[in-house]
Amino acid sequence: MRERILLNDGWDFTKQGQTQKVNLPHCFNAVDGQEGADYYRGRCEYTRTLPKTEGTTYIEVGAANSVAEVFVNSEKAGEHRGGYSMFRFDITDYLKEDSNTVKITVDNSDFEDIYPSMADFTFYGGIYRAVYLITGLPECRFTLDWGRCGIAAIPQKEGEDWKVKISVRTDGNTDGVSARYTLLDGKGETVAEETCPANEKNISIAVKNPRLWNGIKDPYLYTLKARLIKNDEVIDEVCTEIGFRTVEFDSEKGCFLNGEYIKLKGVSRHQDRYHMGNALTAKEHEEDVSLILEAGANSVRLAHYQQDDYFYSLCDRAGLLVWAEVPVISRFSEKKQANAKSQL
């Protein structure tokens, strides 16, 4: 079964020839990025040793602004262009049996092929979200190269009936492997289940009279558990939270949640704090949701970029409607269009 190992502690951080110990999340513009327009924009390095792993192993970086390169034992394992989204690389073939070192370079310079180039916020540099190793992956598994967990679950209303439409991607040989999709209510009790071949990419599960996600009044969530089974043994498992709701907009009448009018009262949220930059922890994300609710809001615009997946989950659990964006802003270029689509 897969295992997630947190790698936030004990990094050697090098900037302009000077090295110091840091823990993640880390922002190298936490001070100068908030003291004026003249802040450092350039390349820095993060290095540390890796714990011993078993089998197929990925590295997962929550976000690093804005171009990141990952090297394992001095060999380049991958490059990510875009400063606000999670990325993963399969590093299995770069690992040695004895000891291993990872180096992640991060550059927050202005690149002609990457959004954004200009805006009314600081382009903080650093590895400012958590880093994990995902190891112990079975030969047949839900893929780590498509979405967050290899499945996308979308509740849909068809007439008076509800269904969960599930899109799935797996890796490896699916011979003799089945997939089981179980919908659990807020108490963890099974309300619907479907078993099918593991290579089935599109599944639909009927759900009778689900309790609706109804904003702040009742932000009720279900959990979809997806498992791969071989010889009666669960070999891989992932989960995702979902809410049953409809959202409609009428140009004359406004917004309707589950068929009822709702007056949207919202705020715009950036992912930074004073002298922390954008290297926020769960504590700051939770505090921001509390402040948004205290202000009387029922919706939030996440300006102007992808924010931490944890914050979206907090909004779901609090009943906040979310407007999400990618950083296509202010200065536009045909050279950046491929990157814009990638970020979207």
Image (tube, rainbow, N blue to C red):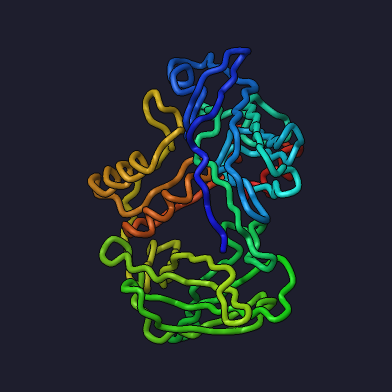
Horizontal side of residue 123 vs 77, given as left or right: left
**At 53% across and 77% down in the image, what residue appears?**
181
Q: How many marks?
A: 0
Residue 239 to residue 6: above or below:
below
333 or 5, which lies in front? Answer: 5
| Residue 196 picture location, percent across and down | 62, 84
Q: Is any part of residue 191 visible from this angle?
A: yes
Location of residue 281 in the rendering, given as x and y in whole percent from the top left corner: 40, 39
Q: Nearer the viewer, residue 320 or 178?
A: 178
Vertical placement of 157 versus 121: above or below? below
Where is residue 273? Give x, y as percent: 38, 30
Q: Residue at x 66, y 33 (%)?
A: 67
Q: Is residue 209 left or right of residue 1?
A: left
Can see residue 332?
Answer: no
**Would residue 76 be found to the left or right of residue 23 on screen?**
right
For the N terminus, the image quarter is bottom right
Instruction: Tell me where residue 25 appears, x and y as whole percent.
Output: 47, 34
Q: Which residue is pictured at 53% across the width and 14% down the height? A: 38
Q: Residue at x 68, y 36 (%)?
A: 70
Q: Which corner quadrant of the image does residue 103 belong to?
A: top right
